[in-house]
Amino acid sequence: MSRSIKLSDELINAATATGKALHRSTPRQIEYWAQIGKIAEENPELPLGFVRDILVSQEEASAADVTDYDFG
């Protein structure tokens, strides 16, 4: 479901600039920031880098871009 919401020009401009650098659209960049923020609020003990690594791992698994790891 899509809804219109009012966001500050400052947030939109920041998301546009960051999104261009990371090859994301402005809405996708804002969604990414919201996802990171939600995870950080729910798990305040986790460092940001760890949260990002989890998100990357989930995307790799979804794309079947995984290999077995040998703990030996």
Image (spheres, rainbow, N blue to C red):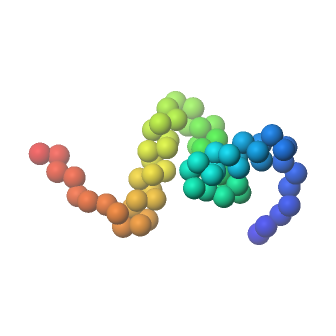
What's the residue at 79%, 67% (across, down)? 2
Q: Is residue 2 visible?
A: yes
Regarding residue 35, the answer to whether it shows in the image is no
Position of the C terminus by quadrant: top left
Quadrant placement of the N terminus: bottom right
Which residue occupies the extreme left position in the image? 72
**Coordinates of residue 41 in the picture (x, y in percent):** 63, 37
Residue at x 43%, y 65% (from the top left corner): 62
Q: Position of residue 34 (x, y in %)?
A: 67, 47
Up/down of 27 relative to 10, above or below = below
Occupied quadrant, residue 28: bottom right
Name the foreground residue: 6 vs 72. 6
Residue at coordinates 45% horizontally, 52% vertically from top-left?
56
Q: Considering only vertical position in the picture, is 14 above or below 57?
A: above
| Residue 9 coordinates in the image, percent (x, y) | 84, 44
Residues 46 and 24: in front is: 24
**Which residue appears at 50% of the width and 41% of the height?**
51
Of 21 and 12, nearer the camera is: 21
Which percent across, then down, holds residue 32?
Answer: 62, 50
Above-or-below relation of 5 to 15: below
